[in-house]
Image (tube, grey):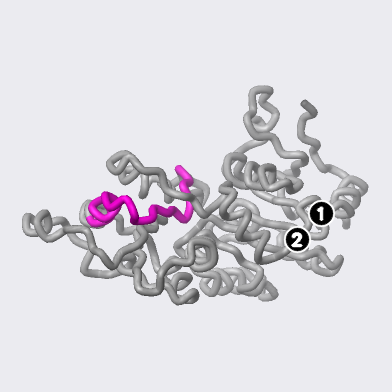
Amino acid sequence: MTGPVKITSKAEVEEFLSKYDNFLFDCDGVIWQGDVLLPHVKETLSLLREKGKKLIFVTNNSTKSRKAYTKKFSKLGLDEVTPEEIFGSAYSAAVYLKKVVKFPADKKVLVLGESGIEEELASEGIQFVGGTDPSLRRDIGPEDYDAIVPDPSIGCVLSGLDLHINYLKLSIALINLQVPETLFLATNIDSTYPTHGKLFPGAGTMCAPLVLASKRQPISLGKPSKAMMDCVKAKFEFDPVRTCMVGDRLDTDIRFGQEGGLGTLFVLTGVNKESDILDENADVVPQQYMTKLGDIFELLH
């Protein structure tokens, strides 16, 4: 198997850009780290737009809606990014429920997660409970063990990154998952959440207790799932061969691109390092890689 090719010259950048019309970007670790824009990302994105490339930002972070993400892009000086160019796992889950599952209008989604999920479900006209409900941000009490029973109005448990996860929320979710007809979805099953140069527990750690207790596996709507790729392809209608996935994480971003039939570009500003892709036993290897996304601009100038 041929190893990944490192892009280090102007000629290599030009050849790389000539192969693709569309670029899918992960955000944290590629565009920014935490709340800091990475070097020459703004110039690189502008350059790609000038060349007529279509840009799509695909993120597994379900805590923010597309609208909220647009505000973050703007805050970092990327004012040209629109909500229509953003495809997050919360939106992916909402689209899956609405368009693929045809979720019944009289049913509700029990949310383990933040406002991003709620906003995207609302945008698709889907009813929900749980989520940011302040009444659930407390310890479980003796009376709860009798009070928690399956809710016939709940047709789906949707698990995402919940910054206020607790035993009460997990208990309500588990009791409802014991009804076989209740759908079990996850915005993503990432083990970690990279931010501020460190790794924190990811959305996968929210649903892991439910997987263990219910003996059920959720359908994941984030990278690298085929379900998310199908939703992205349906929305943007691109040619996979002329599309490149750019990411910093091998098990989500690069696998997502490979399994979707896309080209792959790996950058060294996030989770995985150069040694991970050069390891002869590496499970996932990108086609090409560079130190950072901003190298595209720097090497052309």
Q: Is residue 177 magenta?
A: yes
| Mark 2 crowdedness (10 Å alpha carbons): few <14, some 14-19, many ≥20 | some
Is residue 54 found left or right of 85 in the rendered image? right
Q: Which residues are magenta?
A: 172-191
Is residue 281 found left or right of 21 in the rendered image? left
Is residue 297 found left or right of 36 in the rendered image? right
Q: Is residue 119 magenta?
A: no
Amino acid type shown at disc 1? Arg
Report the front residue among 299 and 216. Answer: 216
Do residues under tags 1 and 2 come within 8 Å of each other at their CB atoms? Answer: yes
Return the x and y of residue 68 as percentages of the image width and height: 51, 72
x 74%, y 55%: residue:
294
User: Mark 2 highlights which residue?
Assistant: 238
Is residue 255 found left or right of 144 in the rendered image? right
x 90%, y 52%: residue:
14
Amino acid type shown at disc 2? Phe
Return the x and y of residue 126 as percentages of the image width and height: 42, 72
User: Mark 1 highlights which residue?
Assistant: 242
